[in-house]
Image (cartoon, rainbow, N blue to C red):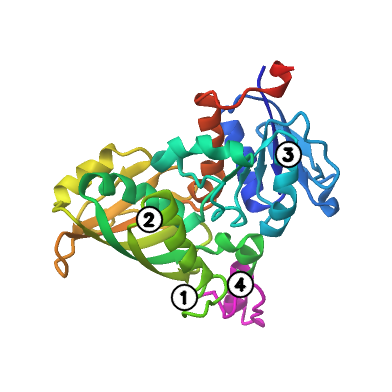
Amino acid sequence: MGYKVAVAGATGNVGREMLNILDERKFPADEVVALASRRSVGTEVSFGDRTLKVKALENYDFSDVDICLMSAGGEVSKEWSPRIGAQGAVVIDNSSAWRYDADVPLIVPEVNADAVAGFTKKNIIANPNCSTAQLVVALKPLHDAATIKRVVVSTYQSVSGAGKEGMDELFAQTKAVYTASDLVTKKFPKRIAFNVIPHIDVFMEDGYTKEEWKMVAETKKILDPRIKLTATCVRVPVFIGHSEAVNIEFEKPIGVDEAREVLRKAPGCLVIDKREPGGYVTPYESAGEDATYISRIREDATVDNGLVLWCVSDNLRKGAALNAIQIAECLVNRKLLQPKRKAA
């Protein structure tokens, strides 16, 4: 018998991507259920060559569900994930609601898959922030090789990280520029078309934004609490794909060639690093792909044992939906979860 999987938030960008990836990767599910809020009941979503009709999360019975992929936002997750977990389903949550809970593992399978076993405390596993996920995939093999002391990262984050409303706003504003129409700003604090905005999420007292704080806290929890990290997160007029410029300082010497080889052998990484025009990956090329692409690997001569690299990934996939399904695959492959129907 296969598993029963529920996707909560199935009408959103990430929820739809979760359904696509479940089908693409042939996840061993006998039944997949699409859930959302009451206003979306009856909406049709695609699952492979099938069409699923959305049901209401609020009154769904999870007693025979094995895995719930939760992508309905932090407030919904705070309310529903414990309830769903109490019914015996494992919740893999894409919001920030549970990432910093000591009893909830925060997982990127290429980095800390062993920690997934901690899900039993609350039946909840957290997915990291999209910008963190691709970063730690790139950092992990380098940390193993030479021990990272400090990271300085600047992100170039696509509007899909702000959901469908963000994508719609970029499209509408771009159209307005070309047609000399009124340019309306709703989702973002300033115009995003043909512009960049050094502000993602709310500002905190120390001047950093919550997005920047997330990268610090999550990298420490997933990879190593001793790593010092500072981030500047910027929204850019790109539809899909987050990019990061990463400066890394190591405890031990590591050369460019060694780093390139380490990354080439690492799970989830794809190195495309030719020192010529076009010999690197941009967010446009990462869209629809699973890998974390790494380019522009070079020495940082301003510090001892320093490297700089460029890191790009599809934020809807590795940054969210793909990572969640890889976590579900970890549960299955490690035999940490048995289908309820079989157990019955």
Cβ atoms at labels 2 and 1 below 8 Å apart: no
Report whether residue 28 is seen: yes
The tag earlier along the polypeptide, 4 or 2, is: 4
The residue range painted magenta reads: 170-193
Badge 1 marks a residue whose secondary structure is loop
Graded by Cα atoms within 10 Å as few (under 14), some (14 to 19) or many (20 or more), the crowding at tag 3 reads some
Q: Callout 1: few (<14), some (14-19), or many (20+) C-alpha neighbours within 10 Å? A: some
Counting from the top left corner in percent of width and height, residue 298 is at 19, 58
Left or right, 243 with reference to 104: left
- Which residue corresponds to mark 4? 175
Rounded to the nearest angstrom, the CA distance separating label 1 from label 3 is 36 Å
Quadrant in which residue 3 is drawn = top right
Residue at 46% x, 71% y is: 234
User: In the depicted view, which residue is nearer to us: 141 or 294?
Assistant: 141
The N terminus is located in which quarter? Answer: top right
At a point 61% along the width and 32% down the height, the residue shown is: 23
Give the number of the disc on residue 86. 3
Name the mark nearer the viewer: 4 or 1. Answer: 1
